[in-house]
Amino acid sequence: MAYRGKFRPTNPAKYRGDASKITYRSLWELKFFRFVDKHVDVIWWASEEHIVPYRSPIDGKMHRYFPDVVVHKNMPNGKKITTMIEIKPYAQTLPPNIKKKNSTPTGRVSRRYLNEVKTYGVNEAKWKAARIYCEDRAWEFIIMTEHELGIK
């Protein structure tokens, strides 16, 4: 998933922001950008154009979170909804496996485990802030993984 590049929309009028500066940071994001760019029910969409402040559990300081995508679309019932979407591998949406904590030859806590704990803690703080941000605006917040994207 370590791919990145510029996305050139076929429908730049649907994009909220500078359509010449859309950056995808994974092939999963690229796939989703293509989908929303062409989908008939999408009224507008944006990528990393909204800023959600959150407090990091690592340093206790305020940081800025830029969610992957915000989509405003027509629903079959005639209503319009706005959804903030984070695209992540499913494994990163789960707490780290405590059974792998002491997986080093010496039995010490592994760096990998500590990094997973840190990443998960920061992601949880971001997602909690995003849910509050969306609640205040009557938006939805969802996390899409390879399962929802139909990958793997």
Image (cartoon, helix red, strand yellow):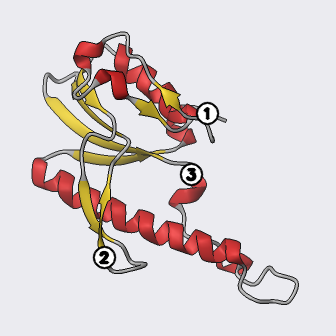
**Sequence-wise first label, 2 or 3:** 2
Q: Which residue in the structure is indicated by mark 3?
A: 90
Rendered view: 34 above or below 147: above
**Sequence-wise first label, 1 or 2:** 2
Q: Which residue in the structure is indicated by mark 2?
A: 61
Cα–Cα span, label 2 and label 3: 27 Å
- What residue sits 55% from the left and 58% below the top? 92
Rendered view: 34 above or below 140: above
- What residue sits 22% from the left and 27% below the top? 16
- What residue sits 35% from the left and 60% below the top? 127
How many discs mark residues in the rendered view? 3
The three-letter amino acid code for the residue at tag 1 is Ile
Cα–Cα span, label 1 and label 2: 35 Å
Depth order, front residue of 24/92: 24
Q: Are marks 3 and 1 in contact (CB under 8 Å)?
A: no
Crowding at label 1, few (<14), some or many (≥20) Cα neighbours within 10 Å? few
